[in-house]
Amino acid sequence: MFSGIIAAVGRITHLTPREVGYRLTVDAGKLDLGEVQFGDSIAHNGVCLTVVAREGNQFMVDVSPETLSCTVGLDAPGPVNLEKALRLNDVIGGHLVSGHVDGVGEVLRFDPVGDNRLLEIRAPKDIAKFIARKGSITVNGTSLTTNDVNGTDFTINLIPHTLENTTLQYLQAGSRVNLEIDLLARYCERLLSADKAD
């Protein structure tokens, strides 16, 4: 589990083809790897991946074709939002995030509003029903609060701190982003649909 509070912006430096998928080499940037062990989970743009090797300030993770087919930002060198998995005594500064991407959205607007940015995203239709006004949403691993929701489109206000400390600063109209809906919405929907099936 994660909280959606990005610890560092790292960089995918190499992709090594494997028999199935790729092994990514990631420069951890300012992420503290001191206590990271093989088998630990680190979220990359909101995607939970397992550390399989470490060397200095770099670590390696394997990514499967299935993951590559339903996410963005892991198939080429470039910057990535990084967050280590939560410990039981950690403060949850954002909201509970599983690291399992529900869909890929498209940025419609990324407009300056003073020193903030208004971000508008179109979500896939099958997950749009889980996105609520003033609710939680994870965009490229970052815990954010929606301002408004209109059908499949929703808006978010990004403050300077978020822009300076995540890869969201690089977004533009047409960018594709990983979305994870709020866990509470997912379980509420399951409970309601189970009642209807009885």
Image (tube, rainbow, N blue to C red):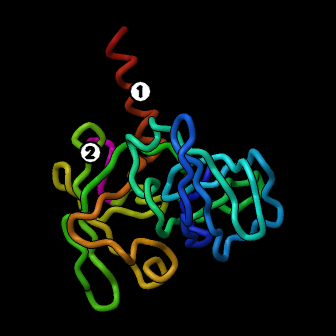
What range is drawn magenta here? 128-133
Q: Is residue 100 left or right of residue 32?
A: left
Kindly identify which numbered label has been placed on residue 190.
1
* Mark nearer the N terminus (1 vs 2): 2
Tell me which secondary structure the magenta stretch mostly adopts: loop
Q: Is residue 40 left or right of residue 139?
A: right
What amino acid type should be assigned to the residue bearing mark 2? Ala
In the image shown, does 180 or 51 lie closer to the viewer?
51
Residue at image location 77% in from the left, 63% down from the top: 55
Vertical comparison of 55 with 40: above or below: below
Kindly report which numbered mark, 1 or 2, lies closer to the viewer in this rendering: 2
**Is 50 in front, or is 145?**
50
Kind of residue at badge 1: Arg
Residue that appears at 43% across and 25% down: 191
- Residue 34: x and y in percent read 82, 66
Label 1 secondary element: helix
Label 2 belongs to which residue? 128
- Label 2 residue SS: helix
Alpha carbons under labels 1 and 2: distance apart: 15 Å
Left or right of 176: which side holds 98?
Answer: right
- The crowd level at tag 1 (other Cα within 10 Å; few <14, some 14-19, many 20+) is few
Find residue 81 and report its horizontal and vertical position in percent.
Answer: 52, 65
Q: Is residue 153 magenta?
A: no
Quadrant location of the C terminus in the rendered image: top left
Q: Residue furthest top?
A: 198
Q: Is residue 21 above or below residue 121?
A: above
Residue drawn at point x = 32 percent, y = 16 percent: 196
- Residue 183's place in the image compared with 73, above or below, is above
x%, y% of residue 11?
A: 55, 69
Kindly check if marks 1 and 2 are in contact, taking CB atoms under 8 A apart as contact. no
